[in-house]
Amino acid sequence: DSTETTEDYSRYWVGIITPLKLLLTIFNLQQIRYLIFILFSLLQCILFVKLNKSLNMSYSIAYLFSTTIICTYYNVSCLAFSTDLLIMQIFMLYILAKHNTGFWQKNRTLHYFVIGSFTFFINFLSAPLLTLGLPVILDMLLDNGHKNKLWTATKAIFAWIGGYGITILAKQIMAKLVLGQQSGLWQILHWSGLGMAEGSDDTSIISRILSGSSGLDNQVTFTDRLLKVVVRSADVINPTTGFILVTIIIAVIILILLKKIKLILPDRQIIPVFFMIGALPFLWLFIFAVHAGHGFDSMSLSVFIFSLLSFGASFIKIDNN
């Protein structure tokens, strides 16, 4: 198409490019998007059934609602967004399959490190929290009798951050050595509100920071960041979502009165985990204020929705029969 314009971004030197090139030898871009949407939908159905069997229908509904409200066809079929969704789904299925094995229990932290690394290897800063937030909550829900879930979840978070961060640095070094350029580091700094000039390389960025005269041309203030969190959160936590949540609450109350749902005491160990994981999307928005938009934030906020609904689900039990 003669109307298309292309730009060279070394930060998009990502792992998904290789399988996409192979697929493009067989399918066109639209067909690949259909395939991704079909795969996502299939994994959604499998996860719903598996969650219902391993936990309770209330958590299955929480998962389905929290992911479906942000998983429009555009988000799912977009090549920039779909990888994080698919990694999240596959990792959750892996946790469901391996959670009770000694291998998982001994290497839990390593798993999160690998997933964090793989998330950034495959793609570049889309909605990576999906591969962390929902799997951690699932992991802790399955971990019956664990006495320090908050500490276990915290270790998982830092392991994921470690894998993600190390891969960021490794990829930029490789891009510089192999491609002769790297745009990932300055772009991440820019998206975090540091305002580095586009095209700055590692040396100029580091020297600017150390010299204290970095030319930060669009620094984002603390107030700007808070405002961005509020504005972008409103895209998901809006009247429509609120109406659906209120409807769910009313339906639950009615079912409790009809004795179709039982009230239970939740596992006190997991309550702090819900709050910690639920806060991650807002922290992400605060840090990467300039990057908010394009569907990135709405997808990440599904982590908050799942945390909120899982918190509510921990107080009820639905008879799966």
Image (cartoon, grey):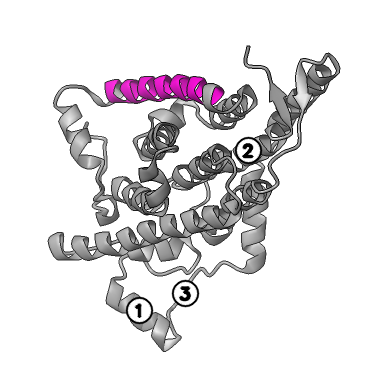
Q: Residue 47 lies in magenta, yes or no?
A: yes
In this figure, which residue is indicated by the disc labeled 3?
216
User: In the orientation shown, which residue stands out farthest toward the right?
Assistant: 257
Q: Are marks 3 and 2 in contact (CB under 8 Å)?
A: no
Query: Residue 40, how many percent across, how many down?
Result: 40, 25
Query: Residue, x 70% and y 25% (percent of image)?
Result: 317
Q: Is residue 49 left or right of residue 82?
A: right
Q: Amino acid at mark 1?
A: Ile
Query: Residue 216, how many percent across, how many down?
Result: 47, 74
Range drawn in magenta: 31-52
Quadrant for the N terminus, please: top left
Mark 2: give few (<14), some (14-19) or many (20+) Cα within 10 Å: many
Mark 3: give few (<14), some (14-19) or many (20+) Cα within 10 Å: some
Query: Residue 13, how many percent across, how many down?
Result: 24, 50
In primary-sequence order, the first of circles 1 and 2 is: 1
The circle drawn on residue 305 is 2
Quadrant for the C terminus, please: top right
The answer for how far apart the CA atoms under marks 3 and 1 are is: 12 Å
Query: Residue, x 70% and y 29% (percent of image)?
Result: 240
The answer for how far apart the CA atoms under marks 1 and 2 are is: 38 Å
Q: Secondary structure at mark 3?
A: loop
Q: Is residue 238 left or right of residue 201?
A: right
The circle drawn on residue 206 is 1
Q: Residue 265 lies in magenta, yes or no?
A: no
Camera-near label (1 vs 2) is 2
Query: Residue 275, how many percent across, how many down?
Result: 66, 50
Mark 1: give few (<14), some (14-19) or many (20+) Cα within 10 Å: few
Q: Amino acid at mark 3?
A: Leu
Q: Amino acid at mark 2?
A: Ile
